[in-house]
Image (tube, helix red, strand yellow):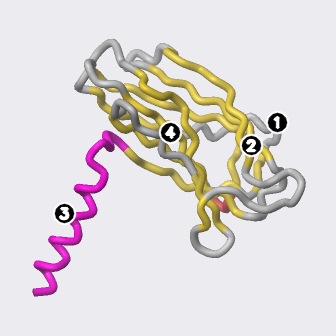
Amino acid sequence: MRVLLALCMMALLSACDGNRVYEDIKDFDERQWMATEKPSFEFIVDDVNARYNLYSDIRNSVSYPYSRFFYTYYLQDSSGTNLQKKLMTQYFFDAKTGEPFGKSGIGDLYDHRFLLLKGYQFKEKGTYRIVFEQFMRMETLPGMVAVGLRVEKSVAGETVNTY
């Protein structure tokens, strides 16, 4: 009975996220993002007629020392050619009150989902890569727990899924 219930719950949960094409997150050692670390994520596009939304998922702790975060993302094709490159600026905390933004997770951790590309259409089937680079001009950036990527098929008339 328990096994049947567990299988039903897994099927129900996976059905709720039918637009997801790819999702992964990478943790940083000791809750800090070294400038030399450039996490990358590879995903496969097999439908060039579809449009896609790409998001960065970032987890920080309250020990992050700034209200804003600067990072660059690179979208590359299978040959390593940059298709897109953009410097992003996001707020983790309210600049005046210091109140954290994002979804509160466990204890002092906060999750953020930021839109990188909305309704992006890939020209060719294949393997693509997103590379993230912190751009805070610090060798060691404390309070950074993890960074991730989510790729989902875009649905006409949808609102983007950020927090």
Q: Is residue 9 positioned above or below 25 on the image?
A: below
**Mark 1 residue element:** loop
Q: Which mark is residue 14?
A: none
Say whether residue 53 is magenta: no
**Mark 2 residue element:** strand
Dot placed on the residue nearer the N-terminal end, 4 or 1: 4
Dot placed on the residue nearer the N-terminal end, 3 or 2: 3
Dot placed on the residue nearer the N-terminal end, 2 or 4: 4
Q: Nearer the viewer, residue 131 or 107?
A: 107
> For the residue marked with disc 2, what is the amino acid?
Phe
Q: Using a 10 Å C-alpha cutoff, classify the residue at mark 1 as few (fewer than 14 neighbours), some (14 to 19) or many (20 or more).
A: few
Q: Which residues are magenta?
A: 1-22
Q: Is residue 2 toward the left or the right of residue 143 in the image?
A: left
> For the residue marked with disc 4, what is the amino acid?
Tyr
Q: Position of residue 15 (x, y in %)?
A: 23, 55
> For the residue marked with disc 1, what is the amino acid?
Arg
Q: Position of residue 139 (x, y in %)?
A: 79, 42
Q: Residue at x 59, y 29 (%)?
A: 73
